[in-house]
Structures are given as C-alpha cells and as structure tokens.
Image: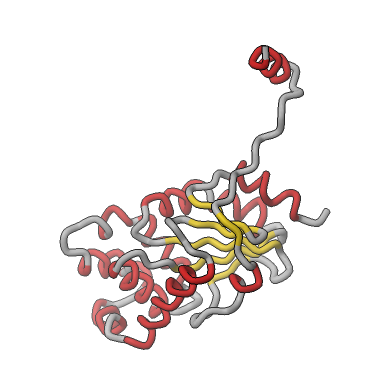
Amino acid sequence: MKLRVLLLALALGTGPALALPQPEGKVDMAEVLKPGPLPELSFGPADGVPVVEYASVTCPHCAAFDKNVWPKLKAAYVDTGKVRYIFREFSRNPLDVAAFTLARCNGDDKAMATDELLFATQDKWAFVENPLEPLLTALRPTGLAHDKGMACLKDNALIGKVRQITETANKVVNVQGTPTFVIDGKTYGGELSVEDFDTLLKPLIKP
C-alpha cells in the first residue's frame, strides 16, 4: 500500500523532496575556517556561505568531482556570490605531498589551476611505477621548469606546510576519505552531486 501511495504521489508531482545527504560527523566550523600555514585557495566573496573541500590529487573520485561537478557548482553558487568555496590540500601519500608542493611552488595564485591540471592528467602520472618524471612533465604547461621543480621538492619548509594542512584536517575534521566536504558544521564524504549541494546550500543562503 505504501509503495502504491508513493508511486501515485510521484505521478501527481506531489512526492517527497529529495532527501538530504547524511553527514558523517559534526565539527566546529570556526575551527575549520581558521587560516592555515599557506594562503587559502578560496573562491567567492568572504561573506558567502563557506564550503570547504578536502581533496587529494591522486584520488580518482576527487578528479571526477573536479571535472563533472565543480564547474556547475562554481557557476551556480560561487560566481553568483552565494558561496565562498575553499579548497584544502589533503595528502594521502608522499606523491600527494610532492604534487601539492610543486603546485604551491608554482605560485599561490596559480596553485588551484595547477591542481586542476593535475586532476585532468591524473592517469598520466599518479598511477605509474615511477611517477616523478611524469609528474614534472604534466606540469610543464604551467611554466614550471624541471630544474625549478626538483628544487621545490627539496624545500623542506614548504613541504612541512603542505603536510601541516593534512595534519590539521585530521585533527579538526577527522577526514576519513577524499573528497570530504564541510558545510554548516557537518562533514560529508564522497562525490556530492550538484543536486546534493542544492539541498544542502539553499536553506543556508539568504534570499
């Protein structure tokens, strides 16, 4: 009977609204938003609803999100001034540390574009036996020369700051996997869809 009623409601356009994605945990948003050791990779106005993404450049799910969801989310919420989107580097392994270090060494103003290039070329460098040279090759279009890249990978101070972002994420957010999103003091794991963001963000955005 319940199934029949539900089907009838859907047919009449009176079915239930899409269910909210279920959070994995709760966090102190003020703690999450505290500045880290490197300039924030953020987009949108300072007074927009804050959305924080923790992502790894060797994570296929993160690459898929960056390709399929982020452009639509940016157009609908960031470019319209509704959301302040913050991208945080979460290193799951030494290759992530190296890649994020190179992206930052390329310039904080170019770091996000460099990370997006790494997502787009992930299959060419992240899953090969000896990834260093393919990684450096992938970054050539950004203007990062091989010699500079090798020097960057010896910058222990910068490497320490990249690692600190992950350490803080583990301490404050308890990231269990990537991507992880923090919205309104709640954490959500996995590839959220644009529709998921709609259901989460619309109640938080001032008319």
* 163 left or right, relative to 112: left
Looking at the rendered structure, the number of numbered marks drawn on it comes to: 0
Identify which residue is drawn at 66% across, 51% down.
Answer: 76
Q: Is residue 163 above or below residue 185?
A: below
Q: Is residue 143 above or below residue 26?
A: below
Q: Nearer the viewer, residue 108 or 143?
A: 108
* Residue 79 picture quarter: bottom right
Q: Position of residue 13 (x, y in %)?
A: 74, 22
Q: Nearer the viewer, residue 166 or 114?
A: 166
- Residue that sits furthest to the left in the current view: 129
The colour scheme used here is secondary structure
Query: Which quarter of the rendered picture does the N terminus lie within?
Result: top right
Identify which residue is drawn at 42% across, 65% down.
Answer: 115
* Residue 101 picture quarter: bottom left
Identify which residue is drawn at 34% across, 59% down.
Answer: 58
Q: Position of residue 188 (x, y in %)?
A: 55, 52
Q: Is residue 58 above or below residue 68?
A: below
Q: Is residue 104 above or below residue 5?
A: below
Q: Nearer the viewer, residue 174 or 84?
A: 174
* 81 left or right, relative to 31: right
Identify which residue is drawn at 25% across, 77% down.
Answer: 146
Q: Position of residue 52 (x, y in %)?
A: 57, 63
Q: Position of residue 59 (x, y in %)?
A: 37, 55
